[in-house]
Image (cartoon, rainbow, N blue to C red):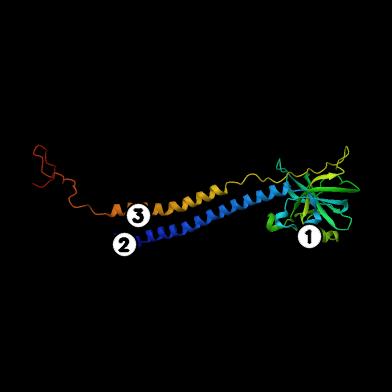
Amino acid sequence: MYRFLLTRQWVLLTLVALLLIPAMVQAGFWQFHRHQERVERNELVAGSLAADPVPMAELTAPARGPAEEDRFRTVTATGTYDAGQEVVARQRTHPGTGAMGYHVLTPLIQEDGSAVLVNRGWVPAGDDPTRLPEVSAPPSGEVTVSGRLMRDETPENSGIRERAGLPEGMVMLVSSEQRAAELGRPTLGGYLELTGTSPGETAAEGEAPVPETLPAPGHRGIGAHFAYALQWWLFAAFVPVGWVLLLRRELKDRRPPQEGAETPPEPDRTPDPGRAPVAGARA
């Protein structure tokens, strides 16, 4: 009765089922790992934002970025802005409106001659993407800045592709390593995402606006990855159940009638004497 399982239709159906089960299980584990990573990142961000501020030089050094556990820590640095070496990072969206703009990157030169790359915030893009946006000059003289310690952007961790032939003063990635080569001086690894300046940064009337400070990264939601993992595992469980149901239906359709089962009566073929014979019928 089970020889039909060797037919092409059933062989293909069984192979598809055998391939779907591990694929769905693997997809569920991938979503579960994403859930765990999100939870761990949330804990890291929350702990780093709550930690006491420390000098940035304690957590990074030239050609050495921050450790994973030090990301998002509140750090400080003291020095003088080098406005002549300021650049903007292209294609950055406003965190609230989604408008396209730039991040303003200005090096802060410390007393020992080393530089700190400071992301001063977001400014809107103009009508011409080849022209630098109008940005208020950074404060002159010595300032102390505070902000979140971030790792350098790369194409791999940011998804941003490098581009050649950009207009002067524009970059694609926020990278202390790249800026160190342009500055010609040691630059602390990673960069400082500005949240405060002492003395404060203000713009005089009629001047270009001060870059908007970027908000703290969200760290509360954990997404729907765990629910997606459960869905994939349920789908994997339904595959063998569906295969068995199809098998049972096929067996039922192929099963011969049982002995003693009632069979439908044969139709009565006795001629009706009251019915006129059909023309042309044989006597």
Residue type, label 3: Leu
Q: Is residue 134 visible?
A: no
Q: Give the residue pinned by disc 2.
A: 3
Residue type, label 1: Glu
First-in-chain label (1 vs 2): 2
Q: Could you say where residue 268 lies in the image, as x and y percent from the top left? A: 13, 44
First-in-chain label (3 vs 1): 1
Q: CA distance from mark 2 to mark 3?
A: 12 Å
Q: Could you say where residue 211 lies in the image, as x and y percent from the top left? A: 80, 44
Q: Give the residue pinned by disc 1.
A: 177
Observer-nearest of 155 and 127: 155
Q: Give the residue pinned by disc 3.
A: 247
Residue type, label 2: Arg
Q: Could you say where residue 90 lies in the image, as x and y percent from the top left? A: 76, 51
Secondary structure under tag 2 reads helix
Secondary structure under tag 3 reads helix
Q: CA distance from mark 1 to mark 2?
A: 68 Å
Q: Is residue 235 visible?
A: yes
Proximity of marks 3 and 1: CB atoms separated by less than 8 Å? no
